[in-house]
Image (spheres, helix red, strand yellow):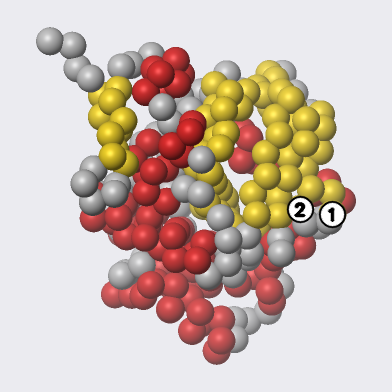
Amino acid sequence: MMHLTASDLSFGYPERPVGRNLNLTIETGEVLCLLGPNGCGKTTLFKTLLGLLRAQGGRVMLGDDALADLRRAEIARRIAYVPQAQDTAFPYTASDLVLMGRVAHRGVFAAPTKEDRKIAQDSLAELGIAELASREVTTLSGGQRQLVIVARAMAQAAPLIVMDEPTASLDFGNQVAVLAEIRKLAARGSGVILSTHDPDQAFAVASRVALMQDGVIVAQGMPSEVLTAARLKSVYGVDVTVERLAGGQTVCAPVYPH
């Protein structure tokens, strides 16, 4: 079983510390949702957990190994990354972009195998975008590109996946599709940590929730324990109601002033 653990972690940039004394663990088979206001440090934290930024204090463990001691290829075989929606300048086809997720398993200069191509095609099909395989990503909408990037992470077949606001640029239908896939990934044994601004998404998919403010985890635990109306108001500054629907789903709604 693979796990990612941050212990007493301080993180940020050389000229600007962002977070401090952070403790977090994600294990295979679970979904951890990270919520917090814009600018609280979620993306910076993710880049530190991936080794893209050097920790300023504490440590990150990936399995039984210190992240700082691992080569990039070793990290890529253990943890995949879905960044925030981004443009790409090169006219790769969607299939070629997804195939890049297989580089960790075959090397940068090795030609993709028949199995690699099948995995890439299956990843596109799983998200309902198989018809985009031959399209250049520069011609796709922002939402379509984001789905292709999610498919690339799936094709990487790492036991852990970090997703930075994976549904931010997607329409409602595709948000549902990606959230459903996240639940499937956890059911198959993957560990997923994702950031979102929508408490409803955390209620829908999360095993655990971490609520972040000013670079600090202020609460973590079960969604029903962490995402209370009082705590959400404290972090976001707005009144909300949290209700359980007759079908069993929990939802969060803002209370607008009269």
Q: Which amino acid does the dot numbered 2 rest on? A: Leu
In the visual, does 141 lie left or right of 41? left
- Of residues 5 and 55, the one nearer the viewer is 5
Residue hosting label 1: 65
Quadrant in the picture for the N terminus: bottom right
Where residue 4 appears, as percent x and y from the top left, is 71, 50
Q: Which residue is drawn at 52% across and 62% down?
A: 186
Q: Is mark 1 on a helix, strand or loop?
A: strand
Quadrant in the picture for the C terminus: top left
Identify whether 20 is placed above or below 194.
Answer: above
Where residue 210 appears, as percent x and y from the top left, is 55, 35
In the visual, does 250 lie left or right of 24? left
Task: State how far apart marks 2 and 1 are (Cα).
Answer: 5 Å
Q: Bin the neighbour count of mark 2 within 10 Å (Cα to Cα): few under 14, some 14-19, many 20 and up.
A: many
Q: Residue at x 52, y 30 (%)?
A: 211
Q: Bin the neighbour count of mark 1 within 10 Å (Cα to Cα): few under 14, some 14-19, many 20 and up.
A: few
Q: What element carries label 2?
A: strand
Residue hosting label 2: 62
Callout 2–callout 1 Cβ contact below 8 Å: yes
Kindly give the residue lying farthest to the right in the view shown: 69
